[in-house]
Image (tube, helix red, strand yellow):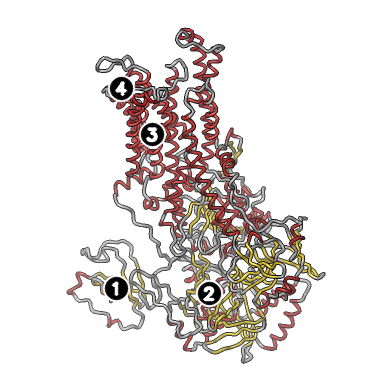
Amino acid sequence: HFCIKHLRANDREFNLSYEYADNAIKTSKYNFFTFLPLNLFEQFQRLANAYFLFLLCLQLIPEISSLSWFTTVVPLVLVLSMTMAKDGSDDINRHRCDRQVNNRKVEVLIDGELRSEKWMDVQVGDIIKLENNQFVTADLLLLSSSEPLNLVYIETAELDGETNLKVKQALTVTGELEDSIEKLANFNGEVRCEPPNNRLDKFTGTLTLKGETYSLDNERVLLRGCTLRNTQWCFGLVVFGGPDTKLMQNCGKTTLKRTSIDRLMNVLVLSIFGFLAVMCLILAVGNGIWEYQEGSKFAAFLPKQEGVNAPLSAFLTFWSYVIILNTVVCISVVEIIRLGNSFYIDWDRKMYYPKSDTPAEARTTTLNEELGQISYIFSDKTGTLTQNIMTFNKCSINGKSYGRYVHVEKGQKTEKVDFSWNNLADPKFCFHDHSLVEVVREGNPEVQAFFRLLALCHTVMPEEKKEGELYYQAQSPDEGALVTAARNFGFVFRSRTPESITVVEMGELVTYELLAVLDFNNVRKRMSVIVRSPEGKLTLYCKGADTIIFERLNPSCSKLKEVTTEHLNEYAGDGLRTLALAYKDIDPKYMEEWKLRHHEASTAMDEREEKLDALYEEIEEGLLLLGSTAVEDKLQDGVPQTIEQLSKADIKIWVLTGDKQETAENIGYSCNMLREEMTEVFIVSANTAEEVRKELQPDGPEEPTVTKSRSGLFCLLKTETVADEPVDGEYAMVINGHSLAFALEKDMEMELLRTACMCQTVICCRVTPLQKAQVVELVKKYKQAITLAIGDGANDVSMIKAAHIGVGISGQEGMQAVLSSDFSFAQFRYLQRLLLVHGRWSYLRMCKFLRYFFYKNFTFTFVHFWYGFFCGFSAQTVYDEWFITLYNLVYTALPVLALSLFDQDVNDRWSFQYPKLYAPGQLNQYFSKRAFVYTVLHSGYSSLVLFFIPWAAMYDTVRDDGKDIVDYQSFALLAQTCLLIAVSIQLGLDTHYWTSVNQFFLWGSLCVYFAVIFTMYSNGMFLIFTSSFPFIGTARNSLNQPNVWLTMLLTSILCVLPVVAYRFLRILLWPTINDKVRYKVRQDKVLPPAPRRVQARRASTRRSGYAFSHAQGYGDLVTSGKFLRWTPKSRPALFSQTDSPLAQTQPQFYRTIIEGEDTRTTPSLNSAFSARLSFKMYVCGSTVLVTVKKKKKYW
């Protein structure tokens, strides 16, 4: 039911007739001709910019213009130019990236020969040649390769963030083409397939060749963005190019993201327009009344223009006041502040990752303050929380545990096992228990059988390009880790064929006949192989989840099973992924009979899977336990600490991953998102809608509390908000993709959201890229909260674009998520610095800027309003025209810019120490409609003081020499000077963090003001530009009078006094978290300690059942017969000496005295140093634990 794509190999003319997209990509927004009109169009979509353009048009009408045109043009052009420069710079970078990709070279088969062509010139239907380590040019149908069985190995990090290699295989019929240019040039197969889509895991199509039709699926296709690995060459047919490739389809269309402050500003600007219209209307009505009652008295020296009566005068005055009161509208200078704060992210050395030379990058400069308001984080797992690197750390063999964790401190070296005796060992492999090598080399049969199983029971493909240099191609990285461990301990998997496996066992080459592979799946949770040794012995080797293996053990293994279970619990406590290993000798006669039944089942047309499962169950009974393995899926550094810190900031973290449920659960435990002490962890895994509904509502149906409201411009946007419900205890929810598909349906999504929001942790596993975006949209829609999505692959792009903020993990993995993100860095742990420091500061600075900007502009405008009642509503300005022009541009611009770029309530260390400082941003406490109303009221009070105090002080006043100073120009000078001083003092009160730049800008602006007025009001400027500088001599005439300066002092005190009093009472009676922390900072006067990575062992009774489970960091050396490092809790000192380590609660070291050990070798406690000795003794059975410490010597 969809349009089928049809293409023919090596036939460009045929394919061009369908007008398929070429292989060029374009992510830029502008070109040379469209930049100016498109950018201006975008900028004038902001109401404030459009308003000032309208204002400029009004100023060009002489009848209503009471201000010169330059008072509007200069600030408008300045703001437009700076924004245009920023947008232009961003787009130039996009053009540069596009050119870099489009100009890559690849070999294309054209007219019977291979030619080097640019990627952008590749067409659908072309056959191209790829070589090892090359990026895949477009979405290709694999034709042939250099590897046996037409296999290729690809790395899909660009698509899904996974660095483990995946295998693709060409059809046998096309594999016969090999690398013959003649055969490939004559290849004319026709492909019919699905149209372009964003499904990374699915491809449907057919290949028609010589009248035969062959089915095509995802295993035959190489996707753009993948990298060819360990494959000398391969040929492919271009199916999708450029924007049609699945990689680009997943990018979607970039939507314009706007912050919540931007959306609020649009509402406020509209309100300001209404407020401005009301003020202008009041003054216009006043003008009409005044003209009607008093206007005729002034006609003698102010003659009216012909035809102008009172109503017309009022109409013209309305528009004149629209021009005069324009400063009530905030022009969009916020872009400059955002740009400056984004540079801090780019320059932050604490977010620079030296291993991959990757700095943090603010790819979008318009969303900084939103980083300080995040309530929900949606994170991918693989490559984001984890490194996707597996290491073999511990194992249990025949009841004995091997492998130690070593905590490396300064000056302490970790002793690694030396594998130099094994020529085929992997030099990168590390292990820290020498005893295991010793028992292997001594020939211990159980230990050798253990590693023989690891070398035989797997699906790994080996590659040996040089003698002795082995490379393993594993489809899952854990299998690679296990086979590598066997390799280093002397059981080297060397090569395989479909019928045999060749292993080097302790230096001897042994080839086993492979009789059957009983593969792993999510139901069986185990894998087995049946092999025949060179001696003819038949053995089944099995590995899998411990719970599954233990059910199938021979009863004779019960004691070994108990000991191994203890070891498994210990490994789970360390957060390791565990597997149990077992084997079984098989009777040859039974094997022959079983193989016949297996052949019949594998060729059955009905119930094939059920019959095979029954056979597998039958032969996998009565196993003998060998032991268990413990593999670590390494988390990125600092992940548990980062999650804990963000949780303290009341940020909810949801993990959305495509991995299986067990894997996701164990990573949850490793990250401390899931904990043993939680009240309950809900598992939602039903396969029908009704069952999912029951699992989401275990206590019966209950409707969530939904609050309906309106928001946005003109309140046209209807919103529904699901309220948070209080819960007793801590809960978590794990839901799989099948259940999530039902839960996201319209009739169930509210129940999903209600249940999920009552949980502290939510993990969604086996989810598709589309489901990731749907979950984000659900929270955005019904929680009205700011969301952040973080990921590293193309499967995360839809989620990153759906969230308010998208963060890409950059580095060695794929870059597709980074290209679609708003911010990027190399490690997940940098997220806490991005939010708790940069985000919080940006939000704080932006809110302070807006409150102060509205305050100073409303105060400036209200003084005009009050003056209208004293000038006959004639639209005369109360200030000098040049002061109006320079007020926002020069006199108050740099000080508020310094506030917006440098201010901070506490430094970064204290921000980490008190994550709760982040809460005000989530609650919009610093800037909201209420805060705006308070600012307007504050401005109203200040304007009353700033107008009426100078007016009353100057009324009927004379100079000390008796000359008059009660003139319009002197009053204008006094009013504007009082205004500037008052708003400067207010800025000082708002500044928490003073720098030399703040001081310079604030005092410098005041000095510039006085320098400008003395210059502009001088005789020289009046003589040169008489009409432009009419205030001749006003400055020197007024500013040499004491009463003028006293008036300035009085107005300043009256403006500031209520603010200081209110803040004093608020801090005293209703202190905020910021007030409390700032008080503590002043009291302590020292920095808190830098955040440390705590090495902690997670106590757990939960085993990890064939899935990843790993806790970041390990405890100190904890094994029997060795030293145990133990940090005692604080307690009273046993002795009064202050140098006693016990009194100082320093770490102490204990030695376990083994039962039967001759304790007489313990040094006697000499009374000469008994006063400087502290000791502690534990008695448990016959084991005595004694610690003796003198200075730094230990016994």
Query: Counting residues from the N terminus, which is met first, the one under dot 2 or under dot 4?
Result: 2
- Spot occupied by residue 721 in the image (x, y as percentages of width and height): 57, 42
Most distant residue in the front direction: 1024
Give amino acid for label 1.
Answer: Thr
How far is mark 2 from mark 3, CA to CA?
66 Å
Does residue 628 sit above or below 639 in this rendering?
A: below
- Spot occupied by residue 574 in the image (x, y as percentages of width and height): 46, 68
How far is mark 2 from mark 1, CA to CA?
40 Å
Q: Which residue is mark 1?
A: 1187
Residue 732 appears in the figure? no
Quick one: SS at disc 1?
Answer: strand
- Front position among marks 2 and 1: 2
Query: Counting residues from the N terminus, which is met first, the one under dot 3 or under dot 4?
Result: 3
| Left or right position of 492 against 199 | left
- Front position among marks 4 and 1: 4
In this figure, what is the number of numbered marks? 4
- Check if mark 1's residue and mark 3's residue have beta carbons within 8 Å: no
Q: Which residue is mark 4?
A: 1038
Are there few (<14), some (14-19), or many (20+) residues within 10 Å of tag 4? many
Most distant residue in the left direction: 1168
How far is mark 2 from mark 4, CA to CA?
86 Å
On residue 481, the disc is 2
Quick one: SS at disc 2?
Answer: helix
Quick one: SS at disc 4?
Answer: helix
In which quadrant of the rendered image does the C terminus lie? bottom left
Determine which quarter of the picture holds residue 473.
Answer: bottom right
| Left or right position of 926 against 473 | left
Give amino acid for label 3.
Answer: Tyr
Give amino acid for label 4.
Answer: Ser
- Check if mark 4's residue and mark 1's residue have beta carbons within 8 Å: no
- Spot occupied by residue 933 in the image (x, y as percentages of width and height): 46, 31
